[in-house]
Image (cartoon, rainbow, N blue to C red):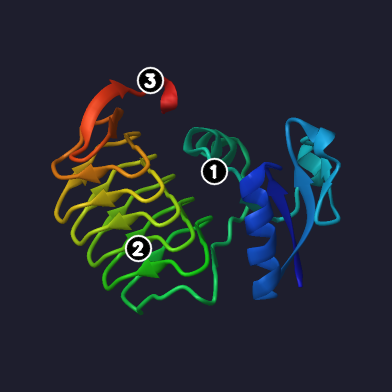
Amino acid sequence: MKPITLYGAGGHCYAVVELIRSLGEFDPVLIIDDNPNVGSIFDIPVQPNQPEQINEYLCVTIGNNVIRKRIVERQKSIYPNFVHDSVVSYPSVTIGEGSVILPNAVLDAGVEINRHCIVNLNATVSHNTIVNDFCHIAIQAAVAGGVQLGEGVLVGAGSVILPEISIGKWATIGAGAVVTKDVPDYAVVVGNPATIIRYNPITNE
């Protein structure tokens, strides 16, 4: 198996370690984190970031879209994508480098998942939807057909986005929200129907 370094020792890391091990192609040998006090995760040592320790292959195991982008921009490595065997997908689906698709997700016909995205447990992305870089579609979220997600969008757990809707870059869809119309850049929306409650800082970029 090929050795791979993971960056980020939070909760998302646990899920990704198990995913990578289940696929059998890569062996997680080291986790680096800016707070190395974790010690180890599933017997994998956690150490502070030392560029010379990073293997040729790297996976950023951080759920926060902003932090994930910052790390990717400064760490020049090869970023494989990882798709659990239980994921429902089709040949017309494309998945960019560094993206992680967790168990029981559904990627329908013509879906485009770009770079360093997370599609979490039991999430559904319906036909012809475009998911741009650094998005996170959380547990049991449902994204209907023909939706466009801008860079860095967080789609909260259990939320629903109706068909043909555009979500602006770095917007946040709150958990359980039902999105019935377009959402502007940086907006945070909650509720049913979803309404804007504030805006994320532009420094997300």
Question: At label 1, which amino acid type do we have?
Answer: Gly
Quarter of the figure that contains the C terminus? top left
Q: Residue at x 64, y 74 (%)?
A: 23
Numbered badge on residue 201: 3
Mark 1 closeness class: few <14, some 14–19, many ≥20 residues within 10 Å:
many
Instruction: Name the residue at the bottom extreme.
Output: 91
Q: Camera-side residue: 13 or 152?
A: 13
Looking at the image, residue 38 lies above or below residue 55: above
User: Could you tell whether 13 is left or right of 38 in the image?
Assistant: left
Q: Quadrant of the N terminus?
A: bottom right
The image shows residue 77, relative to residue 38, as above or below, that is below
Q: CA distance from mark 1 to mark 2?
A: 18 Å
Give the labeled residue for mark 1.
Answer: 63
Q: Amino acid at mark 2?
A: Thr
Q: Earlier in the sequence, mark 1 or mark 3?
A: 1
> Which label's residue is closer to the chain start, 1 or 2?
1
Q: Position of residue 148 (x, y in %)?
A: 23, 50
Is residue 135 left or right of 4 when viewed as pictured? left
Q: Are marks 3 and 2 in contact (CB under 8 Å)?
A: no
Q: Residue 176's spot in the image, x, y percent?
A: 33, 45
Quadrant assignment, res 173: top left
Q: How many marks?
A: 3
Q: Which residue is mark 2?
A: 124
Q: Nearer the viewer, mark 1 or mark 2?
A: 2
The crowding category of the residue bearing disc 3, from other C-alpha atoms within 10 Å (few below 14, some 14 to 19, many at least 20), is few
Residue found at x 81% / y 34%: 36
Residue 84: assigned label = none
Provide residue 95's location: percent of width, then percent of height: 42, 63
Looking at the picture, does residue 199 appear above or below residue 73? above
The secondary element bearing badge 1 is classed as loop
